[in-house]
Image: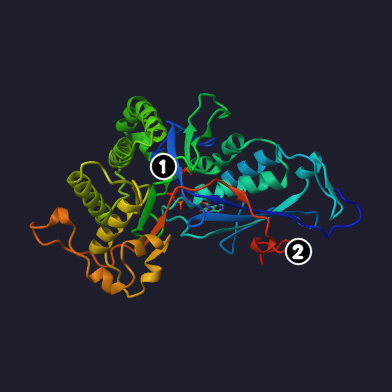
Amino acid sequence: MAEDSQNWVLMVTAQTPTNIAVIKYWGKRDETLILPVNDSISVTLDPNHLCTTTTVAVSPAFNQDRMWLNGKEISLSGGRFQSCLREIRARACDVEDTKKGVKITKEDWSKLHVHIASYNNFPTAAGLASSAAGFACLVYALGKLMNVKEDNSQLSAIARQGSGSACRSLFGGFVKWIMGKEENGSDSLAVQLADEKHWDDLVIVIAVVSSRQKETSSTSGMRETVETSLLLQHRAKEVVPKRILQMEEAIRNRDFASFSQLTCTDSNQFHAVCLDTSPPIFYMNDTSHRIISIVEKWNRSEEAPQVAYTFDAGPNAVLIARNRKAATILIQKLLYYFPPNSDDLDSYIIGDKSIAKDAGINGIQDIEALPPPSEIKDKIPSQKYKGDVSYFICTRPGRGPAVLSDESQALLNSENGLPK
Ligand SMILES: Nc1ncnc2c1ncn2[C@@H]1O[C@H](COP(=O)(O)OP(=O)(O)OP(=O)(O)O)[C@@H](O)[C@H]1O
Ligand SMILES: C[C@@](O)(CCOP(=O)(O)OP(=O)(O)O)CC(=O)O
């Protein structure tokens, strides 16, 4: 370590995407190491719209590890944070910054403390996988700071110990979390199936149905399912292994019909498994069910499916459209049924707003003028559900983690390592 001064601060800032599972992870065989009962597959979401930014800093002036999440200091004493910090420190290597005259040896890292500041550009703990982007970013940023030589798959096995789904956020595009067989979890890690350019027709629309914190966390929900659901055992042993192979093939061949069928069926089975838990867990609500029914009716009225739906541990719908044209029709249908509560369209459709523009939606009057979806024409007049969706996020499959080299994006002050 540089002997002459205690004043230096070394920092790294990284940005990491969130991901949505199309074959779900639900159930652990080891709670501490976070080892799942089945493989899962996800699509990484574009970090331009949903991401975590994390700055990590080290300085001899720091006297304890500290973390700030969305501007508020949080405790790092929890087992999951401690596992990630321990595992990443164990892999730290020599670091030299000649400009600052700083040399940190491998051994120094066990004595040095870190400061971490993280910001999610979307609601935390609301079923939008903040823990996935968050733990992936923490591990990735610390790995860069500590000059860890492990590849992203090996880093994913550390992020997994923060939150299972986090391991899949170490890659862009389409990602598989291999459950592994080893008791120590060393082979339970994520691999990239295809990058985001492989299938760039897909457009993703998230209907944020409620951004309130949920009643049953994923962690406790899946524990109760493992303890009580026989359906989960059938799912993990008989259903998912075959589905994983089919999903890999669908992704490889960009076969939307198969991708969509597998995605919807797997989401529905995950929620069936929640219902099979004792006491039953309800993550979807009436609005979620309405969205499923809108998509199912539309898909059935077309020759081929246009949109896939999937729901995590909450009521928000993640809708994957086969292409931009399908996405513009989808947004028209959604806005027809779920018009905004206020005139503020700008905050009702966020992310890639160009999809709404392509759908001819430039103002509230355009929503009011939308005709009823053709598949319900001549049937009972359809009801509208104003205000039941909080907002929509339009996005697409996106890239994996990246280091942000522009210091203005750092969340910690480079002089004292405290939040800006
Ligand atoms: N940026 C972050 N950095 C580190 N940890 C984070 C970050 N964001 C969230 N977390 C951790 O994840 C927890 C929230 O996870 P939780 O599973 O409850 O919600 P979620 O991930 O938003 O929803 P879900 O996993 O059901 O999609 C937070 O309490 C915090 O411990
Ligand atoms: C429904 C899911 O989103 C469950 C995610 O669970 P978490 O990864 O949040 O759970 P822990 O490992 O206990 O932190 C499905 C999925 O992402 O595969």
Q: Quadrant of residue 372?
A: bottom left
Residue at 50% in and 27% down: 180
Q: Residues within 10 Å of mark 2 (few under 14, many from 20)?
A: some
Q: Which mark is residue 21?
A: 1
Q: Is residue 183 visible?
A: yes
On residue 333, the disc is: none
Residue 77 at least partly seen: no
Element assignment for label 1: strand
* Ligand 2 in which quarter: top left
Q: Position of residue 10 (x, y in %)?
A: 76, 54
Q: How is the image coloured?
A: rainbow
Q: Quadrant of residue 407?
A: bottom right
Quadrant of res 248:
top left
Amino acid type shown at disc 1: Ala
Disc nearer the start of the sequence (1/2): 1
Image depth: mark 1 or mark 2 in front: 1
Ligand 2 closer than 8 Å to label 1 CB: yes
**Residue that badge 2 annotates:** 416
